[in-house]
Amino acid sequence: MTDSKDVGSAENAQPSTITYTVDSFANGIAFGQHKLKAGDDPRDFYNLRLDEDGELARLRSRYTLNKDNPFCELERHLMRLSSQGVLRSSTIYFGTTTDPFLPFQDKFDASMKFLELFKRYTPGLLVIQTRSPLIVIAMPVLSKLGKHCAVTFGVETCLEESVRRYTPNLPRIEERLKTVTALRRFGVEVTLQASPLLPYGDWKTDAPRFAEMLVEHADYIYVRSITDGSDRVERKIRTTALAKKLAQDRKFHWLRPDTANMVISQIEKLAPQKLIVPKRAELADRQVRMFGT
């Protein structure tokens, strides 16, 4: 657990914001916080991992909550933020290391209960991250949260065969696109996350087709390769089942840090505004007043 004095002194160094994360597990939940510097893209820190990737988000502090009653413990943390006067100016990411809506390990029922808490203790912005069509069951809660809620939905490829080969436990692309269409129809802001980018056909000639699909179905788009080329990430991905399958299939190009460039360049031609970090003026103003120096 990180020393709070260290976090406090860092906050005074330059304008920053504190964001929070909630992850649900079979035996409890985790609540964490992280300091983002001005100019950081929060999607680089909080993008939803694939289910095989057990690496935790880089959090300033992480608390494993009471396994016997995680609902009450989450409520206690939200009450604390509310009493400190920071809840309504805070961003909370629900689902960074685990998908809260995949129907495994009895997490779905717990996640629905957690969403009810967010109705009562509403943050400035709740970002729900998932790849599961089951999120549509939470539509009444999302509608109630209104502008205080956004959804990041993982769509790493446009090819069903890539899903079957590399992420066989995840929903079909067709089901995911129907889900995001429904979310947007009810006024829910949707970011499509194509990270880590999986084979979508020929890297060059099929990039326009994938880009068009993302632009059509998203309010915002986030695209990243499986690696950024750093030694830390390269060492980590070598041991993953995904990287081993790509190597086995001799799809070495998809293990390069520049894999996403072609899709990104195509999106820039079609709708460059969808690649930017969403601007939320009211939330930003409050954060500057609280954390700026």
Image (spheres, rainbow, N blue to C red):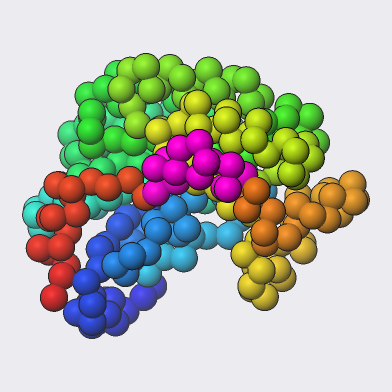
At x 65%, y 31%, the residue is 209
- Is 166 placed left or right of 152 in the picture? right
Position of residue 250 relative to residue 108, above or below, is below
Quadrant containing the N terminus is bottom left
Looking at this rendering, what residue extends furthest in the front direction?
269
First to last magenta residue range? 263-276
- Is 249 placed left or right of 119 in the picture? right
Residue 243, quarter of picture: bottom right
Inspect the magenta stretch and tell me whether residue 271 lies in it: yes
At x 23%, y 82%, the residue is 13
Position of residue 150 relative to residue 8, above or below, is above
Residue 161 in the image: state x and y as whole percent: 79, 29
Q: Is residue 169 visible?
A: no
Residue 104 in the image: state x and y as whole percent: 58, 32
At x 64%, y 35%, the residue is 208
**Which of 155 and 77 lies nearest the eye of the viewer?**
155
Residue 177 in the image: state x and y as whole percent: 55, 23
Position of residue 279 relative to residue 45, above or below, is above
Quadrant containing the C terminus is bottom left
Q: Exactly how many numbered labels are in the figure?
A: 0
At x 79%, y 40%, the residue is 202
Residue 234 in the image: state x and y as whole percent: 70, 68
Residue 185, quarter of picture: top left
Residue 274, quarter of picture: top left
**Which of 77 and 70 lies nearest the eye of the viewer?**
77
Inspect the magenta stretch and tell me whether residue 62 lies in it: no
Q: Is residue 145 visible?
A: yes
- Prevailing secondary structure class for the magenta stretch in the rendered image: helix
